[in-house]
């Protein structure tokens, strides 16, 4: 039986392929990624994740079933609690805290990605919001799963890989994909196309986010 998730993955698969071979991720697994590049990534994640949590909350507001509302409310809370704790520990590995991250500030790609998510989740329909948020769930799960097979000789990088490749995160993403299939099953073709369009945009932002860290992106002026 054909599932909508398979159709959607065909839309983003080319971007995912480019992500897997990006030097940021290959450097994670072979341990050659410069620590200052990973530091940049961690700082930008601390800026991005609160807005991602807000996008999840907005998606839940637009959800049409109590189960979907509960899912996104729970995932919003989990993002704030669990991801925050993870990044506090990662910042500490670099001798930084949340105040330091705030002083460093959000880079252009971080601002652009978060702004796009919030706009779609606040102004779009529920299916549009779902399309926008799914790639962050799904691509991290696929990346974590792929990288877990190789792990990393660097303990800090191995810890990050295990977080997203681990069974608990994979189960969370599986639940969101089940919801995606359920919602898409009753959508008109035009609405499915818009969902896919938003998903492709945020998948591209996923690549840009890692690339921005690799380049240690900053504001040019």
Image (cartoon, helix red, strand yellow):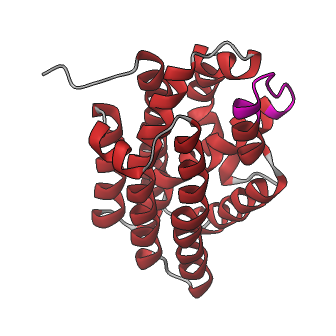
Classify residue 195 as left or right of residue 154: left
**Residue at 50 percent of width and 38 percent of height:** 95
Of the pair 169 and 102, the residue shown nearer to us = 102
Where in the figure is residue 39, as x and y percent of width and height?
Answer: 50, 30
At which x and y percent is residue 149?
A: 87, 30
Foreground pick, 203 / 160 = 160
Residue at the extreme front of the image, as rendered: 95
Going by the picture, which residue comes out furthest to the left?
A: 221
**Residue 57: in magenta span:** no
With 116 as the anchor, is 129 left or right in this view? right
Residue 10 in picture, x, y percent from top left: 64, 35
Tell me which segment is drawn in magenta: 148-158
In front of the other: 28 or 69: 28
Asked if residue 166 is positioned above or below residue 204 in the image, the reply reads below
Q: Is 152 in the magenta?
A: yes
Give the answer, above or below, for where 28 lies relative to 140. above
Quadrant containing the C terminus is top left
Viewer-closest of 104 and 26: 104
Q: Which residue lies furthest to the bottom in this view?
A: 66
Q: Residue at x 43, y 60 (%)?
A: 129
Report x, y in % for residue 197. Answer: 43, 43
Location of residue 104 with respect to 185 vertically, above or below: above
Residue 105 can be seen in this image: no
Left or right: where does residue 107 sit relative to residue 208?
A: left
Above or below, 80 relative to 155: below
Tell me: 81 left or right of 99.
Answer: right
Q: Which image quarter: residue 59?
A: bottom left
């Amino acid at each position: 039986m054909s599932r909508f998730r398979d159709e959607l993955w065909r839309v983003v698969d080319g971007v995912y392929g480019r992500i897997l071979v990006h030097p940021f991720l290959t450097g994670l697994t072979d341990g050659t990624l410069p620590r200052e590049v990973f530091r940049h990534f961690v700082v930008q994640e601390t800026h991005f994740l609160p807005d991602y949590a807000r996008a999840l909350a907005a998606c839940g507001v637009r959800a049409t079933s109590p189960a979907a509302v509960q899912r996104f409310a729970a995932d919003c809370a989990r993002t704030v609690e669990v991801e925050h704790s993870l990044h506090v520990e990662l910042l500490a590995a670099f001798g930084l805290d949340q105040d330091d991250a705030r002083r460093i500030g959000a880079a252009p790609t971080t601002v652009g990605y978060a702004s796009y998510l919030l706009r779609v989740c606040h102004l779009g329909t529920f299916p549009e919001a779902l399309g926008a948020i799914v790639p962050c769930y799904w691509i991290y799960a696929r990346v974590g799963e792929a990288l877990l097979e190789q792990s990393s000789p660097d303990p800090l990088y191995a810890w990050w890989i295990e977080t997203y490749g681990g069974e608990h995160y994979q189960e969370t993403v599986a639940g969101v994909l089940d919801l995606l299939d359920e919602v898409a099953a009753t959508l008109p073709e035009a609405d499915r196309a818009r969902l896919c369009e938003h998903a492709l945009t945020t998948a591209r932002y996923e690549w840009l986010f890692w690339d921005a860290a690799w380049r240690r992106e900053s504001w040019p002026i």
